[in-house]
């Protein structure tokens, strides 16, 4: 069902070009005897050990680049020389170097490894400088188990930046140094566990697992709840006063083994602490925060679908109790033989559900009664509540994959709360494979604006722009397909309640799986953070 991925794959096959490599460069001196070729496939453990060894070797290479002391074979390489030269006027004490292997393969006794190298420094002009470089390398293994570098390619892709402002820095190692669960579990990555856990437990490369932030222990600091695929325990990490993290004790009851696609810290019982909701195949699990010591199950909300993609909460009816909205991408309709799936306008998605909070841990399913059944057959990936019309109640925007998004205005009809779908009339429908949504008054005119994260593809834009892409009598369909490749949309609200596309400035977010507005530099203006994917290929302008 992942037509979007097929679209990207086909485009990549048509448009990818080969990357040139620099020929064999010897960093160590004369050749040494190589061990007899191995015809058996190395074990996972052996691959991990080799990756660690290669990272160590490449770290020395990266440190020499940072210090301006290039190995002889690379002094004549223009790209490596330029990278090294940018750091000539920098403080060596400020250098931070990191190398990570993201791909490793074996061909008999030859080892191929792809790596990312990150270097940060403080320049003499007091600017902060950073570079991220991707390159390939090949190695042989000597009889004594030591590695011999055969080749290091020229940089395949490099990102350079220089700024007077301090960037974010990676504090993972410092924060998690005393936490075994991070090293033993989370630091391994999904690929590691996919090779070790049977899919019957619910682990899958294409299903989503979220996280939640909230003050579980009531100490005024945010804690982190990390959801995991089936077969792996969820983790609750407590934020300590020394700004490190430690896993909550087992007696807390946080380590669920069921596949958990989303989590949300909210005060369900209005007692002043953060309770927890979890989206699992069994339903939405409600957990009470018991005196900041443990999580006690208080019930399960039975949903019509199992592929929960997001959990959001608000008091939509203003009765003082929080209500829950659950969005679903796939549903029972998606599996029908007569599924009405269309790439540009799919109507076989899951049915989103709204549960009204009635107090005392009681909820009522009110999707139809509240008007949210209209158009409730999309592949909904994200939702956000916001009082966009400034009338005092929260309205709802839903980002849908494979079709138009929806804006539901919260009104009172016949004395009860009722939602009216108005995306088309307000100009916020946005047929762009919606994946995220965030509200903010980005231009500070007093009116909430809207950012929608979508699919983006330079390749798709070129392909759908060709005259022969579709016959002329399918112009409307062609327009839909072109919209899918456009990317993200920033909607600016006008005084009449309608929205206009603010332009192409925000397409730099590319294929945006998640996005959020936040004032990062405390200057009073809302900045935008976008988590993206599928940035690949030898050409930085191509996808």
Image (cartoon, rainbow, N blue to C red):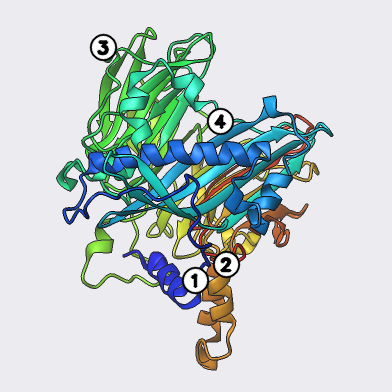
- Callouts 4 and 2 close, C-beta under 8 Å: no
At x 72%, y 31%, the residue is 166
Q: Looking at the image, which is closer to me, 398 or 401?
A: 401
Camera-side mark, 3 or 1: 1
First of labels 1, 4 by sequence position: 1
Q: Can the viewer see residue 509 in this picture?
A: no
Q: Position of residue 173 (x, y in %)?
A: 48, 24
Give the crowd class for mark 3: few <14, some 14-19, many >=20 residues within 10 Å. Answer: few
Instruction: Label 1: state its secondary structure.
Output: loop
Instruction: Label 2: state its secondary structure.
Output: loop
Instruction: Label 3: state its secondary structure.
Output: helix
Give the crowd class for mark 1: few <14, some 14-19, many >=20 residues within 10 Å. Answer: few
Q: Which residue is mark 4?
A: 170
Label 4 to label 2: alpha-carbon separation: 28 Å
Q: Looking at the image, which is closer to me, 43 or 335?
A: 43
First of labels 3, 1 by sequence position: 1
Instruction: Label 4: state its secondary structure.
Output: loop
Q: Which residue is mark 1?
A: 18
Q: Which residue is mark 2?
A: 542
Q: Position of residue 467 (x, y in %)?
A: 58, 90
Label 1 to label 4: alpha-carbon separation: 32 Å
């Amino acid at each position: 069902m992942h037509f979007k991925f097929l679209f990207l794959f086909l485009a990549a096959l048509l448009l990818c070009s080969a990357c040139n490599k620099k020929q064999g460069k010897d960093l160590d001196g004369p050749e040494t005897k190589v061990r007899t070729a191995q015809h058996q496939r190395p074990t996972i453990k052996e691959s991990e050990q080799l990756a660690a060894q290669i990272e160590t070797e490449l770290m020395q290479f990266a440190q020499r680049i940072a210090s301006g002391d290039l190995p002889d074979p690379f002094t004549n390489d223009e790209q490596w020389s330029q990278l090294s030269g940018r750091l000539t006027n920098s403080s060596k004490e400020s250098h931070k170097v990191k190398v990570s292997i993201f791909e490793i393969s074996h061909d008999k006794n030859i080892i191929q490894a792809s790596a990312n190298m990150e270097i940060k420094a403080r320049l003499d002009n007091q600017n902060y400088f950073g570079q991220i470089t991707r390159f390939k390398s090949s190695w042989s293994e000597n009889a004594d188990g030591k590695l011999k570098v055969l080749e290091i390619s020229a940089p395949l892709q490099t990102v350079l930046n220089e700024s007077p402002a301090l960037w974010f820095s990676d504090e993972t190692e410092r924060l998690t140094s005393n936490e075994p669960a991070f090293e033993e579990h989370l630091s391994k990555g999904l690929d590691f566990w996919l090779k070790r856990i049977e899919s019957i437990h619910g682990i899958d490369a294409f299903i989503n697992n979220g996280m939640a932030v909230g003050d579980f222990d009531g100490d005024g600091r945010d804690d982190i709840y990390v959801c995991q695929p089936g077969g792996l325990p969820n983790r609750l990490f407590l934020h300590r006063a020394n700004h490190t993290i430690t896993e909550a004790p087992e007696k807390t009851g946080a380590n669920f083994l069921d596949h958990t696609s989303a989590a949300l810290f909210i005060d369900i019982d209005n007692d002043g602490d953060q309770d927890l909701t979890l989206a699992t195949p069994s339903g939405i699990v409600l957990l009470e925060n018991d005196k900041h010591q443990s999580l006690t199950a208080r019930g399960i909300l039975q949903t019509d679908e199992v592929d929960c993609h997001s959990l959001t909460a608000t008091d939509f009816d203003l009765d003082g109790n929080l209500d829950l909205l659950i969005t679903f991408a796939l549903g029972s309709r998606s599996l029908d033989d007569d599924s009405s799936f269309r790439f540009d306008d799919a109507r076989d998605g899951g049915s989103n559900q709204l549960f009204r909070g009635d107090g005392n841990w009681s909820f009522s399913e009110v999707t139809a009664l509240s008007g949210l059944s209209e158009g409730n057959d999309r592949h909904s990936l994200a939702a956000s509540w916001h009082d966009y019309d400034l009338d005092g109640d929260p309205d709802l925007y839903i980002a849908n994959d494979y079709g138009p998004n929806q804006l539901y205005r919260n009104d009172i009809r016949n004395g009860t709360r009722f939602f009216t779908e108005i995306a088309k009339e307000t100009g916020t429908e946005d047929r762009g494979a919606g994946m995220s949504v965030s509200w903010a008054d980005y231009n500070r005119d007093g009116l909430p604006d809207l950012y929608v994260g979508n699919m983006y593809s330079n390749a798709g834009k070129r392909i759908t722009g060709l005259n022969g892409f579709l016959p002329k009598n399918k112009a409307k369909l062609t327009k839909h397909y072109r919209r899918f490749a456009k990317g993200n949309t920033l909607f600016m609200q006008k005084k009449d309640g309608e929205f206009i596309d603010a332009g192409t400035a925000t397409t730099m977010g590319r294929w945006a799986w998640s996005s959020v507005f936040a004032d990062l530099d405390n200057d009073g203006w809302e900045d935008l953070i976008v988590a993206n994917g599928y940035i690949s290929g030898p050409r930085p302008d191509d996808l």
